Amino acid sequence: MTLGELASIKHIGAKRALSMPVMLPSLADQERIAGGLDAMDEAIAATRVEAARLRKVRAILLSGLLDRSITIAHAELEV
């Protein structure tokens, strides 16, 4: 975009914004959408918890392998 093109973009003030029609979904659709978003939030939270748990397991495993308190053969038997 050139400077001239930027200068031709009109400012949308409060009066113009209020006069613009906005289509909103019905209340039933909003509730359905919100329910889907809630389910996604729960899935994201569960995924984050599991990722944190796996990071802890990984840290413990790597530490044990490095200090030789866990051997690879021993680790395979635990799985």
Image: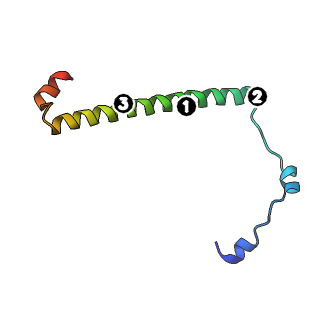
The image quarter containing residue 58 is top left
User: Real-space Cα distance between discs 2 and 3?
Assistant: 39 Å
- Residue 33 % position (x, y): 65, 30
Look at 23% across and 33% down and name the residue there.
61
User: Real-space Cα distance between discs 3 and 1?
Assistant: 18 Å
Say if 44 sits above or below 8 in the image. above
State the mark number for residue 53: 3
The image quarter containing residue 10 is bottom right
Secondary element under disc 1, as helix, strand or loop, is: helix
Amino acid bearing label 2: Leu
Camera-near label (2 vs 1) is 1
State the mark number for residue 41: 1
Neighbourhood count class around disc 2 (C-alpha, 10 Å): few under 14, some 14–19, many 20 upward: few
Look at 16% across and 39% down and name the residue there.
66
Camera-near label (3 vs 1) is 3
Q: Nearer the viewer, residue 17 or 23?
A: 17
Residue furthest to the top in view is 78
Left of 60 or right of it: where is 68? left
Amino acid bearing label 1: Asp
Number of marks: 3
Q: Which residue is mark 2?
A: 27
Left of 43 or right of it: where is 19? right
Secondary element under disc 2, as helix, strand or loop, is: helix
- Residue 54 % position (x, y): 33, 32
In the rendered view of the protein, which quadrant contains the N terminus?
A: bottom right
Neighbourhood count class around disc 1 (C-alpha, 10 Å): few under 14, some 14–19, many 20 upward: few
- Residue 73 % position (x, y): 11, 28
User: CB atoms at circles 2 and 3 under 8 Å apart?
Assistant: no
Which mark is first along the chain, 1 or 2?
A: 2
Which mark is first along the chain, 1 or 3?
A: 1
